[in-house]
Amino acid sequence: MKIMKFGGTSVGRPDRMHHVATLITRDEEPKIVVLSALSGTTNALVSIGEAMSQGDKDLAKQQIDKLSSHYDQFIQDLLVDERFRQKAKAVIAEHFEFLQIILKISFNEALNKDILAQGELMSTKMFSIYLEQQGIDHVLLPALEFMNIDFNDEPQIGTIRVKLNQLLQQNPQCKLFITQGYISRNARGEVDNLKRGGSDYSASLISAAVNASVCEIWTDIDGMHNNDPRVVKKTFPIEQLSFDEAAELAYFGAKILHPASIWPAQQYKIPVKLLNTMEPEAKGTLIQEEAGSVGVKAVAAKDGITVVKIKSSRMLLAYGFLRKIFEVFEKYRTPIDMITTSEVAVSLTIDNDASLPAILRELEPFGDVEVTRDQSIIAIVGNEIAQTKDLLGRLFMALSPVPVRMVSYGGSAHNISVLIPGQYKNQTLQLLNSGIFGLE
Ligand code: ADP
Ligand code: ASP
Ligand code: MG
């Protein structure tokens, strides 16, 4: 069985949905097809939620009505048979009725998650009706019945496997399943999600749960590029990456993959392919156990980083100091990305500062605490990168115009990270493109 995941732009226009239908029927292998919401929908649902949380019901209503007209037109263009058009209209109308009802009830976070789930629910239902119109046999699998996350928001592959297999066994003859990416059910039984871009994560979890032959991530670009194509003009696709390399790139900001999307596939040794829906014959990127080659593969950037620096002479020759500091971050469930220490100070970075005020209060007794916001981590990733001849020389030569704040080298065999002020990000990515990859 193989998994094929199609992102927002791949299903974001009626003609693209038609094209997806041809891609999933090209071979006979049984499949689970994971769909995102139509491009722009989740952003719209986020702003509807924001308007609601600020009590601005008029604005929320305006946004709901605008989205609703978009779906009316989409159905009109997607389907030609009036019978199926009417069916799709009725199905989508239910979702917009739900959105109209929320305008009348009090807003809370659980309701917000319900709002955010509408995108994937609508895209899969419309696609299913399109397949029906085309006479393509399939079954729609409700992700909310198998995609579970626990009290720590962590998906549990064991539970997902049991529930998903039960659903698959109910349809033993079926060769084509369609399901929603992104959405999940949490430990309280409420509708939840795997965070923005989470459909990649859904696909990887499903691959692991069914021991898929491959997890194909179909998107709008021909694979993982050596640098961020949104920032740098000349970039090129990478043919092969190891799981470790891909995981680092995803975690450190390569938007093509959700930050956590590699570990399930890696744990169950399922190869992942990044493919281009608009150019299906392009090679794309194969991600598997072996790296393919040694040396630098790509750079990526993660924005919105906050540095916390704790300075204390009590650190001198003391032990247990770092443990106490780490315990504070652990207590507030705030992951640390980079860390550098000297005899009297430690600097560490976080990307989630929701609990920062409480963390700072608890850190105060340890020494002088300094906070700097709006930093970016630039990750330079490649198998055995540290052994690449002249790399450090070339790296720091390229970075000479940039005020580097922290460096992490040696923590991992396939990553060197530097921390820079956010406003230098674009320039840094460009400088590395010429300094490391020789591209102007
Ligand atoms: P989807 O909607 O299919 O999930 P995304 O927008 O989430 O697509 O991811 C694809 C986008 O990721 C590309 O269009 C590209 O702009 C961006 N991207 C950022 N860094 C990279 C990279 N290193 N390689 C390829 N794409 C990247
Ligand atoms: N629709 C969700 C988002 O936009 C999930 C995804 O596209 O992967 O974040
Ligand atoms: Mg995505």
Image (cartoon, grey):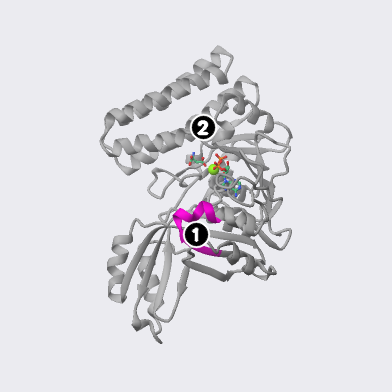
Above or below residue 312? Residue 123 is above
What's the mark number on residue 38?
A: 2
Stretch in magenta: 417-428
Q: Would residue 91 be seen by someone viewing this image from the given angle?
A: no
- Ligand 3's quadrant: top right
Count of numbered circles in the view: 2
**Is residue 256 toward the left or the right of residue 290 in the image?**
left
Label 2 neighbour load within 10 Å: few <14, some 14-19, many 20+: many
Q: Quadrant of the N terminus?
A: top right
What's the mark number on residue 93?
A: none
User: Which amino acid does the dot numbered 1 rest on?
Assistant: Ile
Above or below residue 304? Residue 116 is above
Which residue is painted at 67% across and 67% down in the image? 384
Q: Considering depth in this image, is 214 or 419 the residue closer to the camera?
A: 419
Q: Considering depth in this image, is 42 or 293 the residue closer to the camera?
A: 293
Q: Residue furthest front?
A: 401
Label 1 neighbour load within 10 Å: few <14, some 14-19, many 20+: many
Q: Considering depth in this image, is 35 or 316 the residue closer to the camera?
A: 316
What's the mark number on residue 377?
A: 1
Which mark sits nearer the N-terminus, 1 or 2?
A: 2
Whole-angstrom CA distance, mark 1 to mark 2, is 30 Å
User: Helix, strand, or loop for circle 1?
Assistant: strand
Residue 426, x across and y down, in percent: 52, 51
Q: Residue furthest bottom?
A: 317
Residue 175, x across and y down, in percent: 67, 34
Q: Is residue 106 magenta?
A: no
Q: Quadrant of residue 136?
A: top right
**Is residue 20 toward the left or the right of residue 117 in the image?**
right
User: Which amino acid does the dot numbered 2 rest on?
Assistant: Leu
